[in-house]
């Protein structure tokens, strides 16, 4: 629906521009395709994969420790050789380890997301700058993201906010 609206808007701009004897240049780009072919993105993906793998190794070690403790606990519980108080303490250790694993998983996901944002930000800024530069250099008034219909670039003087505010009596 949003893409259809953007297409209708683009067509209206084109029709209006040609009827007013002025050309409105509109462009589009699929930034995901651009992103996928950029060498920097491949390097970033590799760094992120290494980071994620290190987190996974840590998590796997914790899970292995948990499995070992659970197996030992079950053996001791079934044998009946352990005092109830010792079993309760060991069960508490297992619960604590399960909680630590859950907390680790949440924190690891947050760390991975933060690392991803940190590494991709300069590349995203570079792409945005290039899009704006190309638009200005080639006289485009609007650049749309082809996959979503979002406006990536527009000429400031086409912003009608000041006119609408005036019409509504807002200062």
Image (spheres, rainbow, N blue to C red):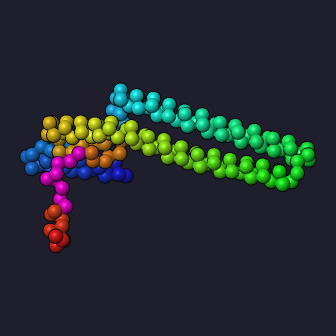
Vertical side of 164 occupied by 71: above or below: above
Mark yes or no: residue 30 visible.
Answer: no
Tell me: 86 left or right of 131: right
Vertical side of 111 occupied by 165: above or below: below
Residue 94 at x, y percent in the picture: 73, 48
> Toward the viewer: 48 or 86?
86
- Tell me the quarter of the picture where residue 138 sits: top left
> Toward the viewer: 13 or 45?
45
- Residue lying at the far right in this picture: please name it: 80
Mark yes or no: residue 34 visible.
Answer: yes
Name the residue rendered at 80%, 53% in the picture. Answer: 88
Vertical side of 39 occupied by 99: above or below: below
Name the residue rendered at 33%, 32% in the picture. Answer: 34
Residue 50 at x, y percent in the picture: 50, 31
> Toward the viewer: 86 or 170?
86
Q: Which residues are magenta?
A: 153-161
């Amino acid at each position: 629906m949003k893409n259809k609206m953007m297409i209708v808007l683009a067509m209206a701009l084109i029709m209006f521009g040609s009827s007013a004897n002025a050309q409105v240049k509109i462009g589009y780009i699929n930034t995901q395709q651009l992103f996928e072919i950029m060498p920097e993105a491949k390097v970033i993906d590799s760094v992120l994969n290494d980071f994620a793998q290190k987190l996974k190794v840590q998590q796997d070690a914790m899970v292995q420790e948990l499995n070992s403790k659970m197996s030992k606990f079950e053996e001791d519980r079934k044998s009946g050789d352990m005092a109830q108080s010792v079993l309760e303490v060991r069960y508490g250790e297992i619960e604590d380890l399960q909680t630590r694993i859950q907390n680790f998983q949440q924190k690891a996901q947050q760390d991975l997301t933060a690392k991803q944002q940190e590494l991709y930000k300069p590349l995203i800024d570079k792409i945005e700058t290039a899009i704006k530069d190309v638009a200005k250099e080639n006289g485009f008034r609007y650049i749309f993201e082809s996959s979503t219909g979002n406006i990536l670039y527009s000429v400031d003087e086409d912003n009608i906010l000041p006119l609408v505010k005036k019409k509504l009596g807002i200062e």
